[in-house]
Image (cartoon, rainbow, N blue to C red):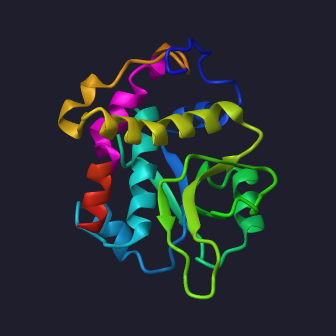
């Protein structure tokens, strides 16, 4: 429940680590070509799903770091990267979150040791395939507080759209105490940075 009162950042947890270092470490499925990343950062439509992955990293940054959406260190993984490499990067703290995690929509695709947000993009089944893919944010399973925060930020973009709340009216998002008083504006700050899901989608795909 969004009105739940929760504790502040857990000592030694990922949220505390992000606050102490001052930036978010976000993994993305991007090759050496950095053009998409550069386009998103200056507001140019990329027309690629990777742009949406980057937008959610920006929403997370703003929600934790008090309205600063671009304090992010991006680490790119080949699109063919195996999940064991992503899982290892999360476990070692090389990244805090991986944006663009794929899962088969059939529901048979399970990844041990990882937590997944609500899907934010669906890819229709390709020819000779019985199942499409869902894309979501991925965190390590052991830090439930961080995984919960990531979940709420993704949900906030959908809830904002459903309630007609836009980037320009972000203060209509509720104040929350899910993760202590210092992060009570996290939903407002996320929407202030990137807008609702529809705004994000249109900015990426035009």
- Relative vertical location of residue 7 with respect to residue 78 in this rendering, above or below: above
Residue 75: x and y in percent read: 55, 64
- In the picture as drawn, the residue positioned furthest to the right comes out as 112
In this picture, is 50 found above or below 193?
Answer: below
Q: Position of residue 127 (x, y in %)?
A: 56, 87
Q: Is 26 rendered above or below residue 47? A: above
Could one spot residue 84 in this view of the protein?
Answer: yes
Q: Is the magenta stretch mostly helix, strand or loop?
A: helix
Direction from residue 77 to residue 44 in the image, left or right = left
Who's the residue at 43% across and 50% down the image?
56
Q: What is the x, y in percent for residue 70?
A: 37, 49
Q: Which of 61 and 188 is in front in this view?
A: 188
Q: Give the range drawn in magenta.
A: 182-197
Q: Compare residues 118 and 63 and report the one nearer the observer.
A: 118
Residue projecting furthest to the left: 168
Question: Quarter holding the C terminus?
Answer: bottom left
Extreme residue in the bottom direction: 128
Q: Residue at x 76, y 62 (%)?
A: 108
Q: In this view, does 89 lie to the left or right of 4?
A: right
The quadrant where residue 95 appears = bottom right
User: Within the magenta stretch, is there residue 140?
Assistant: no
**Residue under the image location 54 percent in, 70 percent down:** 29
Query: Residue 11 location, x and y as percent?
Result: 69, 24
């Amino acid at each position: 429940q969004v009105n739940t009162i929760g504790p502040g950042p857990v000592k030694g947890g990922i949220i505390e680590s992000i606050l102490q270092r001052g930036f978010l470490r976000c993994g993305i499925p991007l090759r050496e070509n950095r053009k998409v990343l550069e386009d998103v950062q200056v507001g140019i439509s990329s027309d690629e799903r990777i742009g949406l992955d980057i937008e959610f990293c920006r929403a997370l940054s703003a929600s934790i770091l008090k309205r600063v959406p671009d304090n992010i260190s991006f680490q790119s993984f080949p699109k063919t990267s195996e999940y064991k490499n992503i899982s290892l990067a999360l476990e070692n703290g090389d990244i805090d979150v991986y944006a663009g995690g794929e899962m088969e929509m059939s529901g048979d695709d399970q990844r041990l040791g990882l937590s997944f947000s609500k899907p934010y993009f669906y890819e229709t089944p390709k020819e000779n395939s019985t199942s499409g893919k869902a894309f979501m944010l991925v965190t390590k399973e052991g830090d439930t507080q961080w995984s919960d925060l990531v979940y709420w930020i993704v949900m906030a973009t959908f809830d904002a759209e459903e309630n007609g709340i836009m980037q320009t009216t972000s203060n209509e998002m509720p104040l929350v105490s899910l993760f202590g008083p210092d992060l009570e504006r996290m939903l407002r700050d996320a929407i202030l940075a990137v807008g609702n899901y529809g705004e994000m989608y249109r900015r990426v795909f035009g």
